[in-house]
């Protein structure tokens, strides 16, 4: 970056990914930025999870039907899961299975330390 200085401030682990907080001196002031996985991948040499993430059942299902995340390839790292409803993380829904009690569009994101995360296709849950 031309005319800038890069300073590492801190890192912290979140349920879905590691966010890097940093400040950059540009021109006359400082600003703070939260980076996404792509930038972190450049810094930490992230790999791509090679398998596919699917849900059983898939397509359309009914409320109170157990959804199961299936990752087609076992990585040597332990996997973490985050279920989402209509694109927003569901608090506490971090296991391989989830039983939705309301209608909506559900996905699951699978993550492993040192890898980019992968998200399933959506499952439509109806009454």
Image (tube, rainbow, N blue to C red):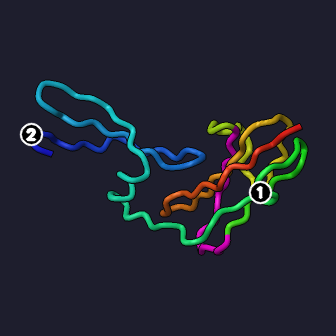
Residue 72, position as x, y percentages in the image: 67, 72
Seen in the picture, residue 33 relative to 52 is either above or below; the reply is above
Task: Label 2: state its secondary structure.
Answer: loop
Q: Residues within 10 Å of mark 1 (few under 14, many from 20)?
A: some
Task: Label 1: state its secondary structure.
Answer: loop
Residue 67, position as x, y percentages in the image: 81, 53
Residue ID at (81%, 43%)? 125
Residue 90, position as x, y percentages in the image: 70, 38
Horizontal arrangement in the rendering, residue 45 relative to residue 98 (left or right): left
Residue ID at (27%, 36%)? 23
Q: Residues within 10 Å of mark 2 (few under 14, many from 20)?
A: few
Q: Where does the C terminus fall, quadrant-wise?
A: top right
Closer to the camera, 73 or 94?
A: 73
Closer to the camera, 44 or 100?
A: 100
Closer to the camera, 74 or 67?
A: 67
Between label 2 and label 1, give the one nearer the viewer: 1
Q: Where does the N terminus fall, quadrant-wise?
A: top left
- The numbered mark, 2 or 1, whose residue comes first in the sequence reads 2
The answer to if 73 sits in the magenta stretch is: yes
Residue ID at (23%, 37%)? 24
Question: For the residues marked 2 and 1, what is the alpha-carbon distance in whole angstroms?
Answer: 51 Å
Residue at the left extreme, as displayed: 3
Residue at the front extreme, as displayed: 59
Seen in the picture, residue 25 relative to 111 is either above or below; the reply is above
Q: Which residue is labeled 1 in the image?
A: 58
Q: Which residue is labeled 2 in the image?
A: 3
- Looking at the rendering, the stretch of residues picked out in magenta corresponds to 72-85
Residue at the top extreme, as displayed: 28
């Amino acid at each position: 970056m031309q005319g800038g200085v890069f300073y590492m401030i801190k890192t912290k682990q979140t349920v879905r990914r590691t966010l890097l907080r940093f400040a950059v001196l540009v021109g006359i002031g400082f600003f703070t930025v939260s980076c996404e996985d792509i930038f972190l991948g450049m810094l930490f040499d992230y790999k791509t999870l090679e398998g596919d993430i699917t849900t059983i059942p898939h397509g359309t299902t009914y409320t109170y039907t157990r959804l199961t995340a299936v990752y087609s390839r076992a990585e040597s790292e332990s996997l973490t899961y985050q279920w989402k409803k209509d694109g927003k993380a569901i608090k506490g829904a971090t296991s391989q299975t989830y039983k939705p009690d309301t209608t909506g569009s559900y996905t699951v994101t699978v993550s492993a330390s040192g890898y980019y995360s992968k998200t399933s296709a959506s499952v439509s849950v109806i009454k």
